[in-house]
Amino acid sequence: QFLNCAAILWALDQDVSSASASRLLIEIARRSHGGRCAATQKALGEACKLSERQTRTLLASLIADGVISRTRQGGTGNCCYQPCHAIY
């Protein structure tokens, strides 16, 4: 899938504490291109080779730091994760 340099630079420019968090941000940026919703927590974790617990912890930390946002998708119970600021 398409990923431009701005998305990679945005992900790498975030002040995160681990390589796992950086990988997760790159995956969120890749999947949310053009304002689309990024994948579910499970899909993001699988793409980054993280356990469900690691994924949940990293996503919660990134949300608390204001790097990404989470919105619920109507009726599915799944959440959408996106960068808080436009990067494209």
Image (spheres, rainbow, N blue to C red):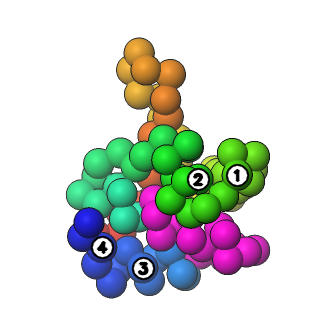
User: What's the CA distance linking mark 4 and mark 1?
Assistant: 24 Å
Instruction: Provide the residue designation for mark 1.
Output: 51
Instruction: Provide the residue designation for mark 4.
Output: 3
User: What's the CA distance linking mark 2 and mark 3?
Assistant: 18 Å
Mark 4 Cα shell of 10 Å, populated few (<14), some (14-19), many (≥20): some
Instruction: Provide the residue designation for mark 2.
Output: 45
Q: Amino acid at mark 2?
A: Gly
Mark 1 Cα shell of 10 Å, populated few (<14), some (14-19), many (≥20): few
User: What's the CA distance linking mark 4 and mark 2?
Assistant: 19 Å
Q: Earlier in the sequence, mark 3 or mark 1?
A: 3
How many numbered markers are drawn? 4
Q: Amino acid at mark 4?
A: Leu
Residue 81 painted magenta: no
Q: Are marks 3 and 1 in contact (CB under 8 Å)?
A: no
Q: Amino acid at mark 1?
A: Ser
User: What's the CA distance linking mark 3 and mark 4?
Assistant: 8 Å
Q: Are marks 3 and 4 in contact (CB under 8 Å)?
A: yes
Mark 3 Cα shell of 10 Å, populated few (<14), some (14-19), many (≥20): some
Q: Residue at x 41, y 15 (%)?
A: 75
Residue projecting furthest to the top: 75
Instruction: In this rendered view, identify the residue nearer to me: 52 or 71.
Output: 52
Mark 2 Cα shell of 10 Å, populated few (<14), some (14-19), many (≥20): many
Q: Earlier in the sequence, mark 2 or mark 3?
A: 3
Instruction: Provide the residue designation for mark 3.
Output: 8
Q: Residue at x 46, y 64 (%)?
A: 27
